[in-house]
Image: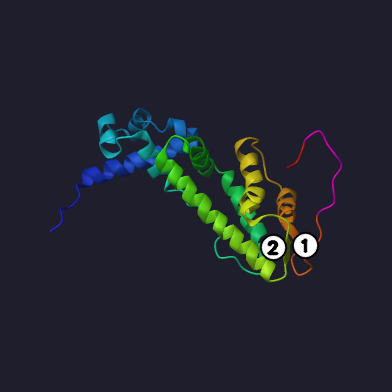
Amino acid sequence: MADTPDPRVTRSREAILAAARELLREEGPSAVTHQRVAARAEVGRATVYRHWPRPEQLLTDAMADVPMPFFLDPATPVRPWLERQLRMLADQLALPDVLAVTTALVQGARSEPQITTRRDRLATTIGQQLRAALTMAEQAGELQTACDPRDAPALLIGPLLYRSLLEPGPVSDDLIDRLLHAAGTWTAGSAISNPPAKRPTSPTTEL
């Protein structure tokens, strides 16, 4: 018969994870330290070390609770579906908890193998789903692609990450529309067949 987990251990672990998620959301990945988490969770630092010997282990588990449900189940017509997905991603990146996890993935990827693995898995999954959607649009006669499929994630998602991480500000519907047209020419069967008109040049450069 398996041993029944000690309820006190379960409660302390849940409290530690909740504290780590709060710190990640409020201050970013650098705040998820054993000392800060222990103080927030109101447990001893040794208790945190017992559950997570290394800070990156705690950070990785905290990040695991933030869902990334993007570009799932493409549907025709693809263009309005893809527009909704990009809008949802942009809106999610504006939320503190999701932005904190994204920052952690970028900052920790080079030095922390566990975070690198999580980042690579996420990038691979999203890339495959996005390319599958563009292939569906092309096969349905909605899209004449203008980019290498391998570049599609960087072309469509990269500007959203730039706007969120480096140039904090809202992502307009116009910007999303321009990203969609950068992928290729959408035919009359899609929601919009022609690219948006060029706007007058202003001191602020739009992506």
Please give the name of the residue rendered at 26% of the width and 46% of the height, measured from the top-left corner: 10
Tell me the amino acid under the disc marked 1. Answer: Ile
Residue 32, position as x, y percentages in the image = 41, 33
Element type at marker 1?
A: loop
Instruction: Choose the circle earlier in sequence order: 2 or 1.
Output: 2
In this picture, residue 60 sits left or right of residue 2:
right
Q: Are the residues at dot 2 and dot 1 in contact (C-beta closer than 8 Å)?
A: yes
Residue 124, position as x, y percentages in the image = 52, 53
Whether residue 179 appears in magenta in the rendering, the answer is no
Residue where numbered disc 2 is placed: 79
Q: Quadrant of residue 114?
A: top left
Tell me the amino acid under the disc marked 2. Answer: Arg
- The reply to whether residue 77 is in sight is no
Instruction: Work out whether 143 lies above or below 103.
Output: below
Instruction: Work out whether 107 lies above or below 6.
Output: above
Q: Residues within 10 Å of mark 2 (few under 14, many from 20)?
A: many
Specify the farthest residue to the right: 200
Q: How many marks?
A: 2
- Quadrant showing the C terminus: top right
Per the rendered image, the range of residues in magenta is 196-204
In this picture, residue 207 sits left or right of residue 132:
right
Residue where numbered disc 1 is placed: 192
